[in-house]
Amino acid sequence: MEVWALQLFNGLSLSSILLLIALGLSLSFGLMNVINLAHGEFIMIGAYTTYALQQAALRFTGDAQSGITFLIAIPVSFVIAGAAGYLVENALIRFLYRRPLDTLLATWGVVLFLQQWARSIFGAPNVQVVAPSWLGGAVTLSSDLVLPLKRIFILALVTACIGGLYWYMYRSSEGRRMRGVMQNREMASSLGVSTRRVDSFTFALGSGLAGIAGCALTLIGPIGPSLGTFYIVDSFIVVILGGLGQVPGTILAALIIGMLNTLFEFGTTAVVGKVLVFAIVILFLQWRPAGLMRAKGR
C-alpha cells in the first residue's frame, strides 16, 4: 500500500507540473487558436528570471538559499514572461489571427530567437537554482512513504494558479470579456468590447502562467536554453485531450496523463510508458475528436 501511495503521489506531482505548463497554453491555443510553439520559451524566461534573481541576491546578501528570494521570483517571473508575451503578440501574433499554420511558423522563429538570446546572456550549459532551505526536507509518513516538500509546494502553487485563473475567467469583468471575444468576436466587438486589448492581455496571461511554470521547474532540476522544448509536446497533448478552450478539461487531462505515465513507467520503462500514453490518447481522440470536454452553446 505504501508503494502504491507513493506512485499516486508521483502521479499527482507529474500531473501538477503538466497542468501548470498547459494552463497558459490552454489560453493561447485552446481559446485563441494560436499554435504557439514559443510557449516553452516563456517557461524558459520564467526559469532564468528565477536564476537571475537568485544570483542578484547572492551578490548583495551572500545567501543563495534565501526563501524570500524564491517567493519574490514567482510574481516577478509571471510579470516578465507576461510582458514578453505581450510584446510578441503586439509585434507578431496580432497579424496572424485565423491563420494557425502561419502562427506555427512565426512562433518557431521566436523559439530560435529566444533560445539564442538565452545562450548569449547565460551561456549554453545548464545552470542550477538552489532551492530554499525550507523546501529541502520531506514529509515522512513511513519508512517507504517520503513526500518531498518541493513537490508538495508545486502542488500548492498549481492549486493557487487554478483558483486565480478561475476567478479571473468567471468572476472578473475582464475574464467575461475574454470568454465573450473567444466565443463570438464580432458580437463582442459590436457591443463595445476592445478585442485587440483582450487578445493582448489573454496572450500575456498565458505567457505569465508559463513563467510561473518555469519558476517551479527550477525546483526539480537544472535549467537551460532548451528547457521549454522538453515539455511543449506534452502540454499540447494535455490541451487537445482536455478539449480546446476548456480549462476544466485541461485539468482533467493533466491528471489522467500524469497518472497513466507514472503507472506505465512503474511497470515498464520511461520510454515505453510515454509511448503507451501517447497511443491511448490517440485512440481516445479517434473516438472523441473534441476531447474530454467540448464547448456548449445555444
Image (tube, rainbow, N blue to C red):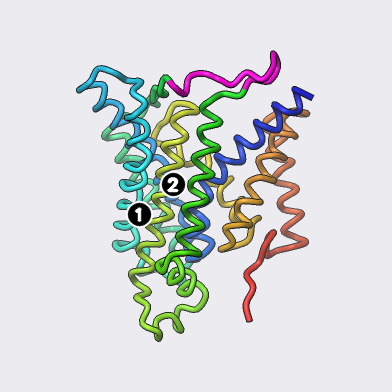
Q: Locate residue 121, reporting x and y percent.
A: 26, 34
Q: Which residue is mark 2?
A: 210
SS of the residue under disc 2? helix
Residue type of the residue flagged with mark 2: Ala
Residue type of the residue flagged with mark 1: Gly
Which residue is most to the top?
Answer: 143
Image quadrant for the C terminus?
Answer: bottom right
Residue 91 occupies quadrant: bottom left
Which residue is depicted at the point 51% across and 35% down? 154
Residue 245 occupies quadrant: bottom right
Q: Locate residue 46, reporting x and y percent.
A: 37, 40
Local packing at callout 1 (Cα closer than 10 Å; few below 14, some 14-19, many 20+) is: many
Q: Locate residue 23, reporting x and y percent.
A: 51, 51
In the image, 70 versus 285, the foreground residue is: 70
Image quadrant for the N terminus?
Answer: top right
**Is residue 224 inside the magenta stretch?**
no
Which residue is depicted at the point 70% across and 39% down? 259
CA separation in Å, label 1 and label 2: 10 Å
Residue 5 occupies quadrant: top right
Q: Is residue 133 above or below residue 16?
A: above
User: Tag on residue 290?
Assistant: none
In the image, 145 versus 195, the foreground residue is: 145
SS of the residue under disc 1? helix
Which residue is most to the bottom?
Answer: 190
Q: Which residue is mark 1?
A: 85
Which residue is depicted at the point 75% across and 48% down? 280
Local packing at callout 2 (Cα closer than 10 Å; few below 14, some 14-19, many 20+) is: many
Which residue is depicted at the point 42% across and 42% down? 212
Instruction: Point out the stretch of residues depicted in magenta.
Output: 134-146
Task: Give whichever of discs 1 and 2 has the lower sequence position.
Answer: 1
